[in-house]
């Protein structure tokens, strides 16, 4: 990739993140819909979707670090990496 990525390179780099964001939004809608439920099946579905949201959040953060770096947003990548280390999302030895 050149120093300044093309629009196509930026889109290609960020596309996998967008797909995960879409899935996360779907899970969030289910969690919100069952926010006040007392039905055991709905509670189970809400919990399953909430756990999946948490998994997606961590994966989005992990994949965003190299993606930001690839498109030239180095400072954002460095800051996100530091925050991810602080939160225990990635180990301190992760490049």
Image (cartoon, rainbow, N blue to C red):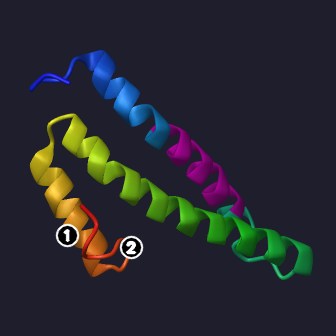
Q: Which quarter of the rendered picture does the C terminus lie within?
A: bottom left
State the image coordinates of residue 83 (x, y, percent, origin top left).
24, 71
Majority secondary structure in the magenta region: helix
Q: Looking at the image, which residue is at 14% across and 22% down?
A: 2
- Evaluate if marks 1 and 2 touch, with contact meaning CB atoms under 8 Å apart: no
Which residue is label 2 attached to?
89
Q: Determine crowd level at label 2: few under 14, some 14-19, many 20+ residues with C-alpha closer than 10 A.
A: some
Q: Nearer the viewer, residue 90 or 24?
A: 90
Range covered by the magenta-colored residues: 18-30
Which residue is tagged 1?
Answer: 82
Q: Residue at x 32, y 17 (%)?
A: 8
Would you say 24 lies left or right of 91 here?
A: right
Which quadrant of the view contains residue 71? Answer: top left
Depth check: give the residue in front, 84 or 48.
84
Q: Position of residue 87 (x, y in %)?
A: 33, 79
Q: Residue at x 51, y 46 (%)?
A: 21
| Residue 14 image point, x, y percent | 38, 35
Mark 1: few/some/many CA within 10 Å (<14, 14-19, 20+): some
**Position of 38 relative to 79 (above/below):** below
Helix, strand or loop at mark 2: loop
> Height in image: 4 above or below 71?
above
Image: 66 above or below 35: above
Q: Which badge, 1 or 2, comes first in the chain's sequence?
A: 1
The picture quadrant where one finds residue 55 is bottom right
* SS for callout 1: helix
Mark on residue 70?
none
Residue 71 part of the magenta-drawn span: no
Question: Marks 1 and 2, Cα distance to the nearest angstrom?
Answer: 10 Å
**Left of 94 or right of it: where is 69?**
left
Q: Is residue 28 magenta?
A: yes
Q: Between residue 55 and residue 70, name the one nearer to us.
A: 70
């Amino acid at each position: 990739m050149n120093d300044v990525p093309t629009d196509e390179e930026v889109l290609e780099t960020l596309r996998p993140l967008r797909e995960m964001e879409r899935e996360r939004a779907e899970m969030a809608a289910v969690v919100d819909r069952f926010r006040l439920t007392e039905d055991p099946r709905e509670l189970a579905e809400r919990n399953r979707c909430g756990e999946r949201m948490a998994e997606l959040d961590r994966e989005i953060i992990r994949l965003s670090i190299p993606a930001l770096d690839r498109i030239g947003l180095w400072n954002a990548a460095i800051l996100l990496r530091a925050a991810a280390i602080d939160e225990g999302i990635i180990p301190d030895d992760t490049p």
